[in-house]
Amino acid sequence: MNFKHKYMFLLPGLLVLLGILIFPIGFTVRLSLSSWDSFFPGLDFIGLENYVRLFTDDARFWESFQRLSFLSITTVFLQYILGFSLALMVWKDIVFQRFFRVLFLIPMMTTPVIMTVIWKTVFHESLGPVNDFFSLFGMTPLWLSSEGLSKVTVIIVEVWQWTPFMFLLLLAGLLSLPKEPFLAASIDGAGPIRKFVYVTFPLMAPISIGAIIIRLIEASKIMDTVYVLTSGGPGTSSETSSFYIFIKGLREFQFGYSAALSLTYLIIMIISLTVIAKMLVKLMIRS
Amino acid sequence: MNKTIRISTMVVTASLLAATAQADKWSDQFPHIKNTGDVAGECSYESMSKKDYSGQKLTINTHAVPVIGEPTALHAQQFSKLTGAEVNVIHTPAGDLYSKAMIPFQAGQAPYDIVFGFSNFIRDWKQYLQPVPAKYVNMPQMQDVTQSHIDVNSWDGEMIQFPIDGDRHYLKYRKDVIDNPEYQAKYKAETGNELRIPRTWKEYAEMATFFNGWDWDNDGELEYGSAEVMKKDDLMFAAFFSRSVAYAKNPRVPGGYFFDLETMEPLINGPGFVEALTDWVEATKYVPPGGINFGLGDEINSFGGGQTLFSFSWDDAFVAAMQDDSPIKNKVGVAPLPGSDRVWNRSNKSWDMEYNQAPYIVWGWTAAVAKASKKHDMAFDYLCFFANDANHQADIAIGRFGVNPFKKSDFDADIYIERQGWDPIIANQYADTLMEMEEGSTNRVFPLRVPGVFQFNSAIATGTSKALAGQLSPQEALDEVAAEWKKIVKRIGADTVREAYSVGVALEDNL
Amino acid sequence: MSLRASHLTLNRENEFYLNDVSFEMLPGKIYTIIGRTLSGKTTLLKTIAGLITQDSGELLFNGGNFDVIPVWKRQVAMVYQQFINYPHLNVYENVAFPLKQRKILATEIDKRVKQALDQVGLIGFEKRKIQALSGGQQQRVALARSLVKEANILLLDEPLVNLDYKLREQLREEFKKIFSSKASENAILIYSTTDPVEAMQLGGEILVMDEGRILQQASAKEIYENPKTTKVAEITNDPAMNLFSGNIAEGKVLLNSTIQLNLPTHFLELPDGAYTFGLRASGITLNKSGFPFQVELAEISGSETFLHLGQEEIHVVGLLDAVKNFDIGETVSASFDIEKLFAFGSDGNLMSSPYCGLN
Amino acid sequence: MRTFYVTLKYIAVTLWSMFVIAPFLWALSTSFKDFNSVTSGATYIPWVDFEPTLEGWRVLLRSPAQGGVNIVEPYLNSIFVTCFASLISIALGTLAAYALSRFTFKAGFIRNDDITFFFISQRIMPPVVLAIPFFIMLGKLGLLDTLFGLVMVYVVLLMPIAVWIMVDFFNKVPIEIDETALIDGCNPYQAFYKVVLPNSIPGMVVAGLFCMIFGWTDFFFAFILTFTEVQLLPVAIVSLNSSITPWWSLSAAALVSVAPLIVVAFIVERYLSKGNLSGALK
């Protein structure tokens, strides 16, 4: 279909979005070419200096990127596996089905920043219940303050918070699957594992890809969790890109520089998400 | 000089205590000031009730409840009742106070008439703030403020921020442990040293290590050596500077502590600082589990809850420990920060082998009026009312308020003994220690108050936390900080930083 | 009333959906478009409806430019192969929808809806939800909705293809009746299908489409007797017409070294040379005097058997009027009915038909 | 073998349920503690492990001048902003998604997919970036500190979600339904609101739920862009986080903030069971 009316459908949304964003984005681009900071708030012009600094003299930014990749890919992978397993479990043949489904959805309804404060008390090394348990075995793992474990803690909290999102999308997908292929597989005498590998999983591939991409987009903003749990510490060991940008922008007020960081981040994210999406499509559809 | 202050203090205090007996009409209406009643002054309840700000609105950005946030809201309510003004109070977590105010400042907006913040924001904020008018600077209420706190709130002789709170770092220790003859004997036997209030950081470390990881107060829980702010956040740098002053602030070497004022080269990676950071890394062994991630709140909880032997940052942990419902009330003592047996002399590049101790005049809570506000009179009246004698006396008695002494009249032990039931020995120790820091010392360090202060402090936090986490050695970490500082200086401009820094150095060098 | 198309062309991403399509249609007749899947049938129907705009060429209705009239004003009706109805409305509301849209009086609407429902045999189903109907019933609702409008042009896009065999047969009969009454009401009916049997049964005019082109437009009889090209012959026969390349030489039809047929009379005037010969499946019979073939496959369909036979490079499909079992690989003897042979030139165009000589 | 799988399944489901509930139980227990019960190590059961107090809950109703934090107004603000922004996002997002699903757009190298990605990519942007520009813009428009200004910002945050869900939804609604409506005499607008819209309600409900979830749980936009008058709930709760973290009142506030969304969880589940959701999600 092709009518001139089509613009009347697209444009309200697009124009509102553009209208609200055009100034902020344009301003950010301009900002990234200036040295705006706490002391000189103003749009002077320094050319690409911020970008040069970013590419030649900011190892911390690139380290935070690596960390972000590690954290987001790990959490999304875990969320996918767990979300899929849970969806399969409450898909059918289970008592209290409704209860479990609602329960499994709840974490995603909570405000991450608030729940993370609760998690922080849960993982509190000397006053929290987790170490109270571990102390039975004479251990006091440093959940928030050791380099390796603090990442694990961030992952646990992220998994708790966002597995329900995967769970919801995948369960909805499972419930909309056609019945025939399963029937056919049953007739062929396929067991549950073969059924999953040859029927369920391939049928779920498109939904899986969509869910993973959306989660990756969201996970790449991992911030609330880090902000509350570890403030990026100890050292810089749990600092992610958006948190680093936050520090440069709203802590140190190097706005010009943080604008350059943000735009670079945005472009890298858009490119890498597109590539990941393409790779996933290849991988999942082929298998 | 010391003596005259003491005498004048006594006079003021006497009058305050005298007022206690007679509740007046204001204390009936405002139970908050029931101890003192209204205290006469330009910004007293009486004076404020004569002002009429009805129909006007005052917007204040302050800290979260309760620390500073609760008194802000309480005094706002009182102010509103007295003057008819509408006062809108916003509460913001400490780490975001700077940005919450800076964003509108930089965007040329004035959503807040009054902004609460820390004294070291002064250089970045100064261009957006309205200096305190002479009539407030000259009033008796302000004359009572200690010189340190006048200095902290002023820029080049001009008062920019309004003193509403006093802050400092000092040593807090478990008096019941240090004074325990049994432990003293045991300690002597095992280490060969006396168990006493630590005079140096090395002694501090030895005692903290000795008392780390066993149940020395027989409550069934393990206790530890020390609770410190080690979390990589906005307060971390202050903890580090408190530990480094003794090694790095040499009374014989003027011309800068953080930078060499002439060259603007960072001194932060000098041997004095490295020594302090080495001590600090050592300290990770005698903090409670997770202590390396403690923020100020955790420190307060930990020491205030009786978990550790020492703690050395702001008043809060001590005040928490001395609250009525505290299990360790009257079991804690106060002393100046530990010193060192030697101090680095950067002019002849060698250690001066002598005892050195220097207070770090820590930045603390202040408030200021936005230049862009259209209600300067009302705003200053509010701040003045916040800090009037009656309110201040009542506020410092409430631990969670986070309002601490900054007036000469505060340094009288009787106030604490009578009003708060402190042990007289502890109360005297407290008053004397604070007074000595405020008025006595000539060898002291002011916080870094330069443009882009957050960038400098953030670099410190990043570098030292890498060292604490074992990612880097102390020297490497501080070299990294110094390199970062150089870049920041270069970005902002060496002259700009120098100009701002020289204001602080002039105070340090007692010029 | 007339609908004329001249040189309609639609090209998307270098693929022709419509390629120089021209025709003229008049009321009172069923026009059946036959073509394989993706041959451009649906595109053509949608273009007529105004849902798709062609790249070039024009549509004329009653001599006026049809292209400038938007779809919602064209007075057309369309039935899709999917059972398309409005899921949020019940049967009655569905059928009434186009009338309400035209702001017709309620009593008039009621009358016409009842009439249309009666026509498709759905009286009594008015209040039903669409989802509660069977596929066949849903398609009847769709048909009723298209009838009730009394549109000038009625488009039916493979309306029976998604129904099971039995239902298809039954509906086809009913449709035929409805259409003939409809056609007489001065409407142009266009029906698309992939099924030659259906096309032939509906009678009327047939348009054979392939790759966006109209290969031949003629009456059903004409198409049957004189398929213009091998392509048309394939498309309009089920099973497709058997095609063999061979020669006419020495007064014989030579298909390969063993299969040599006598020259039928209608081939007499053809010069010697290479041809493509065509023979419908019904032209092949099992007969002892025939040629030996291996059975490759035997499909039983109803009361008939499709027999796939092979000999060397020659593969043919024969149609037996009986149900019979064959073993795969079994040798049978089959003969070709030469009086039913078609001859096509090397360009694929018909040279000689058993029904009347073209030359 | 079958019993083995079933047992395994129930064990797994039970374990996960415990993981999900654990922080809430801890928060519930903590909300009845005071400073001393918190600082004396982990305790669990009131009256047995510690002496319960309602202080944490009382704080939520008290004014800041009494050391409380008034969450009623931020609560209402949050509900208003979330609902209003969700409504606008769905309205505009549904229209745009319909256009992107049904029509072909071409401008230079830009195609439908690129436009869809443009919408979705708004969610990639870290909120920090937009703080100053948004602030300046809202200031210039006189919308600083107004609910409307916040709604505007939230529309940017939520519309991508609405577009994402609705494009998927429309892609699964046969285009022939719209075409039939056009043929039956509707112009494209009429076709949309008379036929497409009534059949899109499940999709819109799901999109609405998602918008509400993401709007309600957002922190950083709310945090950066609320200055004085208009505070949103998460910001109000986080500003409880003073130098001494009041575990008790934070716990109580967390539980209170979760409550309305539990209702949403039930609605989501209902839709899921009825099969409407599956049609609305890819």
Image (spheres, coloured by chain):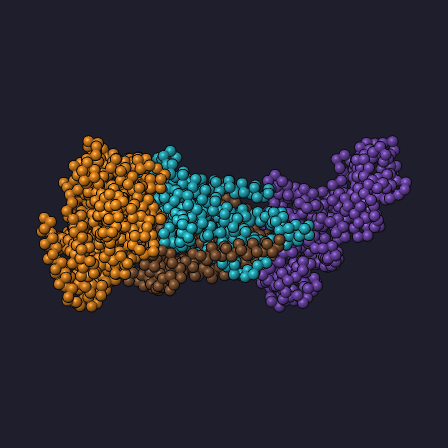
Chain colours: A cyan, B orange, C purple, D brown
Residue that appears at 32% across and 58% down = D35
Residue C72 seen by the camera = no
Would residue B175 appear left or right of A285 to someone viewing this image?
A: left
Would residue D211 appear left or right of B270 to someone viewing this image?
A: right
Residue that appears at 63% across and 56% down = C84
Give B426 or D212, whichever is nearer the viewer.
B426
Residue that appears at 85% across and 36% down = C259
At which x and y percent is residue B114? 25, 54
Would residue C35 appear left or right of B201 to someone viewing this image?
A: right
At which x and y percent is residue C105? 60, 66
Give B176 or D210, whichever is nearer the viewer.
B176
At which x and y percent is residue B176? 24, 54
Q: Residue furthest right?
A: C289
Q: Residue B53 occupies which quadrant of the picture?
A: bottom left
At which x and y percent is residue B223? 32, 51
Residue that appears at 24% across and 48% down = B185
Q: Residue B323 occupies which quadrant of the picture?
A: bottom left
Would residue C62 appear left or right of A276 to someone viewing this image?
A: right
Give B151 or D275, whichever is nearer the viewer.
B151
Q: Quadrant of the C terminus of chain A?
A: top right
Query: Is B17 above or below relative to C209?
Result: below
